[in-house]
């Protein structure tokens, strides 16, 4: 069979997947932008064309900037803790000293990521409870009662309490991805590094880190997108409060669409989330390719 024939055959096999992508991914994205140009209700067929009115409303709303700031904060902290600490923990567990205990620690760290987000949110509501919560009780027990707060009831602490919950839940998942990548590194590279007399930190910096760069980029992209899509934790733990201080873009979208029935505004928020995540992912991929070249 000639090359042209092979390409046609490959396209034939790819066609069902392409059709599903067009139907369930690309069409809804385009439709979301179109719907953001109309004023419409969820249970009404009437639509009024308003152009970019909802985008002007969005970018003049102080709550939008609060939500955007919280998403940026969420993503930045998640990259440091989920990706950064996940990589460090994976490298430590691959050391000979800890390799025998690796199955235990893999299970312990990964287990939170398979628990329902709603369950985790309710669990940490109890942990953060101002009077009977485990966190405040622990602080009082070690003589640090002055650091106690109503963690989910104060504007200055609520968003950080929610972000901390996500780090606990998802760091183990990222760590496992790095573990798989590290285990694929040829042992000859580590043996050569040991012959050269490098220490553990230098081995991590000059051998492990370059070899897991592709996984690192993937984990950063996953974490960035997750940071801008976050909804469940916020909705379960604070519903955007107190005073909308923990509002994120997804909860802002939910409030606009399903509480206020402003479906056009909700579509505009959805389109904005897509543009932000797509742009950040594209920048990250381009930066990674530039470093490789």
Image (cartoon, rainbow, N blue to C red):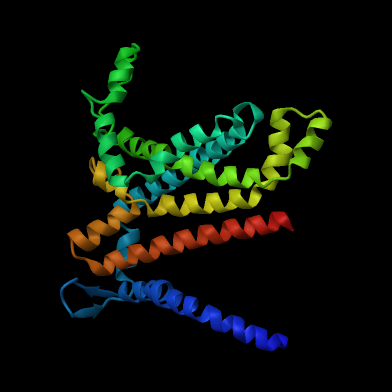
* Image-quadrant location for residue 257: bottom left
The quadrant of the image that shows the N terminus is bottom right
Q: Position of residue 65 (x, y in %)?
A: 36, 51
**Residue shown at 32% from the left, 46% from the top:** 117
Q: Position of residue 132 (x, y in %)?
A: 21, 23
The extreme right residue here reads 196
Task: Name the side, left or right, on which 86 lies relative to 154.
Answer: right
The extreme left residue here reads 43
Between 247 and 285, the residue placed more toward the observer is 285
**Residue shown at 42% from the left, 71% from the top:** 25
Give the vertical position of 290 relative to 188 (above or below).
Answer: below
Give the vertical position of 164 relative to 29 (above or below).
Answer: above
The quadrant of the image that shows the C terminus is bottom right
Task: Name the side, left or right, on which 154 lies relative to 97.
Answer: left
Q: Position of residue 176 (x, y in %)?
A: 53, 43
* Image-quadrant location for residue 14: bottom right
**Residue shown at 59% from the left, 52% from the top:** 217
Give the vertical position of 76 relative to 51 (above or below).
Answer: above
Q: Position of residue 186 (x, y in %)?
A: 73, 45
């Amino acid at each position: 069979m000639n090359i042209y024939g092979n390409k046609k055959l490959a396209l034939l096999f790819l066609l069902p997947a392409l059709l599903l992508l067009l139907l369930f991914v690309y069409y809804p994205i385009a439709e979301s932008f179109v719907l953001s140009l109309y004023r419409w209700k969820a249970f009404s067929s009437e639509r009024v064309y308003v152009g970019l009115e909802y985008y002007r409303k969005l970018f003049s709303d102080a709550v939008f900037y609060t939500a955007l700031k919280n998403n940026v904060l969420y993503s930045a902290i998640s990259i440091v803790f989920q990706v950064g600490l996940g990589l460090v923990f994976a490298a430590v567990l691959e050391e000979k000293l800890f390799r025998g205990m690796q199955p235990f620690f893999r299970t312990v760290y990964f287990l939170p990521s398979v628990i329902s987000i709603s369950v985790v949110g309710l669990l940490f509501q109890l942990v953060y409870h101002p009077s009977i919560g485990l966190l405040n009780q622990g602080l009082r027990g070690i003589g640090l009662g002055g650091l106690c707060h109503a963690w989910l009831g104060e504007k200055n602490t609520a968003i950080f309490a929610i972000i901390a919950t996500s780090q606990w839940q998802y760091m183990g998942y990222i760590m496992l991805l790095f573990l798989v990548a590290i285990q694929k590194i040829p042992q000859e590279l580590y043996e050569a590094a040991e012959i050269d007399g490098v220490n553990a930190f230098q081995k991590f910096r000059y051998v492990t880190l370059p070899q897991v760069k592709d996984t690192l980029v993937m984990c950063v992209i996953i974490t960035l997108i997750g940071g801008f899509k976050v909804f469940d934790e916020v909705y379960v733990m604070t519903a955007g409060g107190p005073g909308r201080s923990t509002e994120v873009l997804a909860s802002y979208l939910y409030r606009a669409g399903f509480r206020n029935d402003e479906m056009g505004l909700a579509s505009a928020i959805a389109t904005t989330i897509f543009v932000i995540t797509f742009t950040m992912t594209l920048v990250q991929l381009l930066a990674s390719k530039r470093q490789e070249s």
